[in-house]
Image (cartoon, coloured by chain):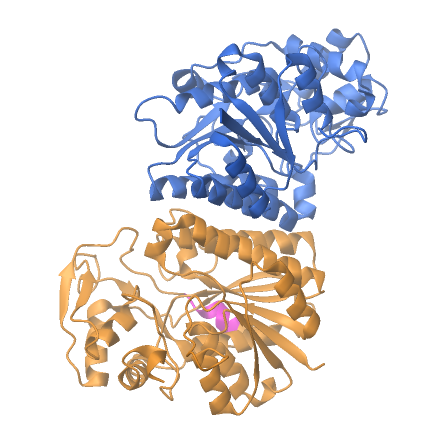
Chain colours: A blue, B orange
């Protein structure tokens, strides 16, 4: 059997772009790609076996993806997949991710994100797989004590949502795993704000319902699917009063995962490592809107409303560790982020349903 | 169907004493007792259906206990039990509890203590049961910033073990549950150091392997089952250099649970409440040994060895909230704790195997 990379949640937004990035690179040809996804946040048309993003990636790359429709809490199902493939390492995206929804449905979030993750770890250990790239979030930092946020910033304090807590708890669990057995190698990638789409415009973000995140909200307004953008607060102590975030192009982010996997080959590499993935630069909501209007040639009407509970004024990453440890840095610009989002959204006003 | 109280882990040490306390009280007669336990830490003789402590409690009280051998991660099994009984509230003890073991086996601890607890909560919600007494621990406070520890002391910081983290995570999950739905009523009882046995000496603590906790260690030395007591450090800044803890008689502790259940009837009671259960007084290891020697008339040889990682010098509780909220305070003395431990241990050198 050829060595394989297991990608949980590989049909989702960051997951599918990472699968694309793995298959686009000639040096990844040595690996087969195995995706498990329960399709909570992925579209599949009725006449296909594979979810749309994976079908499109296969078409674009001419390469095959092994796909299993499976919830990672299904212990037996996971064991069968580990038995059927020669899995070398796991990139673990599978999780629920809507901050607001997590406040309404905490139990669902803890079960999916904590119990699911522990069940995956048990299956990994049972099959001798100890290499893991974990999909974490800058949310674990809570309200920043200072900016930019580096990886030594305290985590877990003042977290505003069960979603954030679930990511923090998973990091703590992985640290305990690494302390208990030096065979574990864990790279926890703390994403800042992933945006954009594959430069082809053929895959992109396809949230269900009203988008929680700024960029899909902007692009759905620009394409006419939503009437106006809601801006949550313009009285923050920032350049123009709106919230400032570190947006990162999803293709840059995906490449961060490819770089992380290479670390596993480094002699002596072991233990838990948290690494920020961002650009290091923050943009305000209004700056993002302006950039998007430029890139798309469309106007994005907006309405300012109250602050959202749990939102911070600003955050952006110190990205020096990513460069030092992974040899990675973001190379795509804000204009790229907007252009590629628009290429995707304008060709697919209703997301993957339009494929 | 008569209303019932579900006790998870009801065959364990604190669980069985709480079942006893519930059945001893005439005002609890209205409730049936339903115990689920996976028997990880409970002994059952080959010729019995029920674990020993429950069999003995039935014999002593003349009352029946419904017993199910079940792991709380068994969703379907739990659903059947909720369907078969009219459960009013849940006292949730079921958990792995050995601090040292949790460092070696973090995944087992997180699965049992977090995933198990979430699965229990799902079953409760599914069956409209929102009243919960949770078995928490002073471990959630980490290293004390000041003494005595009251409930407003920060939790989750500098925790030394996956066990402690699992208790802290569960409290955070329960807070999120209560924020998501005002129907939830949660009382999280933060135990200090439970010791002693039922005053009859017929049930008591029966740890497997070398005891992790001081009192069973002392009593197993006194009864000749172990050669000498290991004292972990005598250079702490305490009265005699040995660690100081707030020991609480398990019958007092059990009664705290009975009081907690009564709170659920209080009009307007809702949300998450953490309450310390301790005596408010700390005793050193050497003070405990001296008291035990007096109570048992036996000598307890000891040997001082190095500090254990994660042990703090001293902790003891501020117990004023328990009095205010539950109308509860500990009434048994250190001499009671030692006398009852010795009554149990001397009659059962090998624990429940000697019944």
Residue B208 rendering spot, x and y as whole percentages: 33, 68
B262 is higher (above) or lower (below) than A50: below
Is residue B321 rendered magenta in the image? yes
- Dominant SS type (magenta): helix
The quadrant of the rendering that contains the C terminus of chain A is: top right
B324 is higher (above) or lower (below) than A226: below
Whether residue A245 is visible to the viewer of this picture, yes or no, is no
A262 is higher (above) or lower (below) than B310: above
Who's the residue at 59% across and 84% down the image? B28
Who's the residue at 69% across and 73% down the image? B84
Who's the residue at 54% across and 12% down the image? A25
| Nearest the eye: A253 or A89 | A89
Residue B306 rendering spot, x and y as whole percentages: 17, 55
In magenta, the rendered stretch is B318-324
Q: Which image quadrant for residue B318?
A: bottom left
| Nearest the eye: A276 or A189 | A189
B96 is higher (above) or lower (below) than B342: above
Is residue A307 rendered magenta in the image? no
Residue A258 rendering spot, x and y as whole percentages: 50, 19
């Amino acid at each position: 059997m050829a060595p394989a990379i297991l990608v949980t949640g590989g049909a989702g937004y960051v997951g599918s772009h990472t699968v694309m990035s793995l298959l686009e690179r000639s040096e990844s040809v040595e690996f087969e790609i195995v995706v498990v996804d329960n399709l909570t946040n992925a579209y599949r048309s009725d006449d296909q076996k594979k979810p749309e993003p994976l079908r499109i990636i296969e078409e674009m790359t001419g390469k095959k993806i092994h796909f299993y429709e499976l919830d990672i809490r299904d212990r037996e199902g996971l064991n069968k997949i580990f038995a059927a493939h020669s899995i070398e390492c796991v990139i673990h995206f599978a999780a629920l991710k809507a901050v607001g929804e997590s406040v309404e449905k905490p139990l669902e979030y803890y079960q999916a994100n904590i119990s699911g993750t522990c069940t995956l770890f048990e299956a990994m250990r049972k099959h001798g797989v100890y290499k893991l790239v974990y999909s974490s979030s800058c949310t674990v930092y809570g309200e920043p004590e200072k900016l930019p946020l580096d990886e030594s910033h305290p985590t877990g304090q003042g977290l505003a949502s069960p979603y954030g807590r679930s990511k923090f708890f998973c990091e703590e669990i992985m640290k305990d795993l690494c302390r208990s057995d030096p065979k574990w190698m864990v790279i926890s990638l703390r994403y800042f704000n992933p945006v954009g789409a594959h430069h082809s415009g053929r895959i992109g973000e396809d949230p269900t319902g009203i988008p929680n995140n700024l960029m899909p909200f902007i692009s759905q307004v620009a394409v006419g699917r939503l009437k106006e953008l809601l801006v949550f607060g313009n009285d923050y102590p920032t350049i123009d009063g709106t919230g400032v975030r570190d947006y990162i192009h999803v293709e840059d982010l995906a490449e961060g995962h490819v770089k992380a996997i290479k670390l596993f080959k480094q002699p002596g590499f072991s233990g838990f490592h948290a690494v920020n993935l961002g650009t290091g630069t923050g943009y305000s909501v209004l700056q993002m809107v302006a950039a998007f209007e430029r890139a798309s040639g469309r106007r994005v009407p907006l309405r300012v409303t109250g602050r959202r509970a749990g939102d911070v004024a600003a955050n952006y990453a110190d990205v020096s560790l990513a460069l030092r440890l992974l040899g990675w840095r973001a190379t795509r610009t804000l204009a790229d982020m907007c252009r590629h989002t628009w290429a995707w959204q304008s060709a697919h006003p209703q997301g993957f349903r339009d494929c």
